[in-house]
Each structure stands twice: as structure tokens, then as C-alpha cells.
Image (tube, coloured by chain):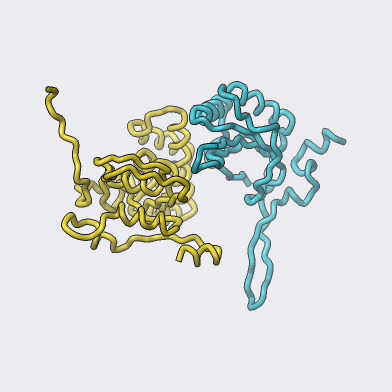
Amino acid sequence: MRLTQGQFSFLPDLTDEEITKQVQYALDQGWAVAVEFTDDPHPRNSYWTMWGNPMFDLRDAKGVMMEIDACRTAHPEQYVKVLAFDSSYGFETVRMSYLINRPAVEPGFELLRSEGPGRRIGYTVRSYATGRPSGERYGGEARHGA
Amino acid sequence: MAKWARRNDMILHLHRAGHSTYTRQKSHGVSFRVIAKWMRMAGVDHIHAGTVVGKLEGDPNVIRGIYDTCRETHVPQNLQHGIFFDQPWAGLKRVMPVASGGIHAGQMHQLLTYLGEDVILQFGGGTIGHPDGIQAGATANRVALEVMVKARNEGRDIWNEGPEILRDAARWCAPLRAALDTWKDVTFDYASTDSVDYVPTPTAAM
């Protein structure tokens, strides 16, 4: 199941040229760009691992692309996203967020039901991948360590 | 109500059905700009603020004044937008404007141009009316939005190239293709009764 989180996730995967243009747009707005990765794709998981600090002082998309490439190369079988943070008064929040890498195989989510009083059902989802420990969830990466 | 909504983990949405009974008259009633301002101060989270395109009338300048009142931290005087004096909002929280009423995927370039991206676009019939079902309708709308934001960020002129951008996406996205075929260029072109009081008149240079 193809993960749809953040901007542009209903579109075909962005090419490097397309990623560069989006990064440049964010930098032109004065936003700081950051790269994060995870192998826990739950939609409410907002604590992805930071690939270094947000690049607060960087003004050229090329530098960001180098970090993106480094993160993708280190974690080819994880989700990697690019974020743009707006520090201006009144926003002080993430303004852009989009996936730029995904595992080759995405098993998707299981729908879980919990029964409560009065036949009430609570619903939640669990990624099939997170049944295994972090680092061993998607294809090849466990083999690198083994 | 805003306090109750926060205490009870609810979002307070303001729908404005019937507002035209008092917002359309020049001679009496209350402009919707005033309502928007009042509701921002009262702690409303979303407010139906006008759509410009779609089945409900709306003058682009009037809508812009209302959206600025909802979203900006500083709204400078702008008579064309119906803003009569500078309005510094300082740290007062914004209200998320909501646009709805007969909108569909084919208008995405117009919606993004007029309303920006900090807005909730509610496609009702434009989702449920999709010939392949509601999920296909939702996909069509999401794809249309994403290609348009992407194109705008890339520096393309979405106002003029919008239909072409949508057609290109429809080549690989069957739900979007069906949506564009269904609604084509369905549009409503009213002369709005809710117009601004000031219109700039060009004068000969002295």
C-alpha cells in the first residue's frame, strides 16, 4: 500500500529536479529546510529521526540536495521526508512536508478494533511493518547489519 | 461556545447559511467582514468566508478583505478590499477560512490563486458526484490540489496554465480525468451584490 502522507504523496515520486525546485521555493520564502527519516509510518508518528539539524542558514538548494542524497543512501529502505519550517511570528510551524524516499515494499496498515462498553468499537491502525524491531522492518537494511 | 469547544476537545466551525439576509444590503445590515472580525476575536476555528468561484456569489475584492481579516497578523488599510483602517492583530489567533459551494477539481488553479493555501476547500458534490464513487472523487481533488501547488511552487503561471496542468495530470490519473470530463468548465458567473464601496477610477495625469 503506497503511503500517502504530506504534500505531493498522491503524485508520482518526485524526481531530483522536482525536489530541487520545491526546496528552492521553501528557501525563497525564508523557511529552514530539514530532512527526517523513519521506519514507523504510523500517520500520528510525528517524531521522525532528524538527519542532522534543520539547515537554518542554508540559502542554496544544492546544499540541501547533498543532505537528501546522504540520508537516502544511508537509509534506502526507510521513509525520508523534507520539511520546511517557517519561523515568522504567527506561524512558527512547519509549512511544507513531503516524502522523497520510500521502501521498495510497503505492506500497509492493519485495522484494529477494540470493544468497549455497550458494544462500542474503537478503531485504530497499525503498520504491518512495525511488528518487527526498528531497523529490521523493511527489506534489506537488517541484512546490512547482519 | 469557543470555551466550551476547547474544554470538550471540539473544533468550532461557523457555517453561515442565511447570512445573506443581513450581509448583502448597503442600506442596512452588517458586512460579513465585521462578522469575520468578530468571530476571530470570539475564538471560532473555521468560518465560511466566501469562495469567489462556485455556485455562491462572491466578489474577489470583498472575499480578499474577509480572508485577510481571518488570516493576517497585520491588515493594512485597503479601501478596494473594504478595509477602512489598519488592523494590527498582534498575537491574536487566526481563523481558518472555509471555501465551499459548487466547487470542483477543474477550478483548482482559480481557488489557489484567489484563496491561497491556508484555507479549507470543501468539495461536497465535487467529491460525491464523481461517476466512479466517492473515493475516486477524493483522489481527483487531492491530485488536482497537489499538482497545482507543485506547479505554483515551481514558478509556473497557474492562472493561465491551470487547465493544461490539470489535463497533464489527468493523463496518468484516471479519477481526475473522469472528474474533469464530468464537470468540464461548469462555472457560475454572477455579478455580485456584495460589492465594495470604493472602486479606483483612473484619472488623467495633471
Q: Is residue A114 above or below residue B201?
A: below
Q: Nearer the viewer, residue B49 or A7?
A: B49
Give the residue displayed 87% in from the left and 36% down from the top: A146
Q: Position of residue A118 (x, y in %)?
A: 63, 78
Chain letter for the cyan part:
A
Q: Quadrant of the C terminus of chain B?
A: top left
Q: Position of residue A142 (x, y in %)?
A: 81, 38
The answer to whether residue B70 is left or right of residue A105 is: left
Q: Is residue A143 above or below residue B44?
A: above
Seen at 59% across and 25% down, the residue is A58
Q: Nearer the viewer, residue B200 or A81?
A: B200
Q: Residue at x 40, y 51 (%)?
A: B97
The colour one sees for chain B in the rendered image is yellow
Most foreground residue, A122 or B132: A122
- Residue A35 in view here: yes
Location of residue A140 (image quadrant): top right
